[in-house]
Amino acid sequence: MTKDQTTDIKRIELCGAIFGVVLGTLLHFSYAWIGQPWAGVFSAVNESPWEHLKLFVIPIVFYLFCIEVFTVKDRSRLYYAKLIQLPLGMLFIIAFYYTYTGAFGTGNLLLDISSFFFAVAASYYLSFRIITSQRTAKLQKLVSLVVVLTILLVVILTTYYPPHLPLFQDENSHAYGVGK
């Protein structure tokens, strides 16, 4: 990979991180703004840790498709990077949340926001490192795309059909998913 290509990818991933933070923040409020159940496809519908994963996942997947259409020529590395980026970022957010709430016994808005920003920044850095240093085969591209789309589908479906587990429960209303 040439230095110019590396610089371009760095720029693309930095823009993705900024886009992720901005869109993720807006998606936190969009369900209340729109007020319709269909908005739960892309918005957090309550204050459960699981619903907040949409704020991380949706911008990455949306940005991935923008990149797919408008930029990167060698997409196999891109898909593989997102395959790694999505679950690791999600795992960090959930692990951080349950670690600090277990330690302090309560939630903290500043820590929630900070963990989201850190997960976005760190995961895009990881994605950049994978894209610029990892060779992937066509099979990895296909598997990566299937896994990314599966994660997106699971995140959306659990809004409407959430398991009755603490991970999916709103901290405030103790409800699950859309109107449940």
Image (spheres, rainbow, N blue to C red):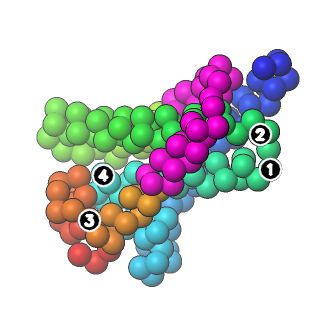
Which residue carries the number 2 mark?
A: 72
Task: Please report the residue visible at 51 percent of the width from the left and 29 percent of the height from the top.
Answer: 122
Total tally of numbered discs in the picture = 4
Q: Residue at x 79, y 31 (%)?
A: 8
**Along the line of sight, which residue is nearer the eye, 74 or 10?**
74
- The residue carrying mark 3 is 162
Q: Amino acid at mark 1?
A: Phe
Q: CA distance from mark 1 to mark 4?
A: 33 Å
- Label 3: which secondary element: loop
Nearer the viewer's eye, disc 4 or disc 3? Answer: 3
User: Camera-side residue: 32 or 137?
Assistant: 137
Q: Is residue 138 magenta?
A: yes
User: Which circle's residue, 2 or 4, is located before the other in the chain?
Assistant: 4
**Mark 3 Cα within 10 Å, few/some/many (few <14, many 20+)?**
many
Given residues 141 and 127, the one toward you in this image is 141
Q: Amino acid at mark 2?
A: Val
Q: Secondary structure at mark 2?
A: loop
Q: CA distance from mark 3 to mark 2?
A: 36 Å
| Residue 2, percent from left and from top | 83, 19
Q: Quadrant of residue 112?
A: top left
Q: Name which quarter of the figure residue 133 lies in.
A: top right
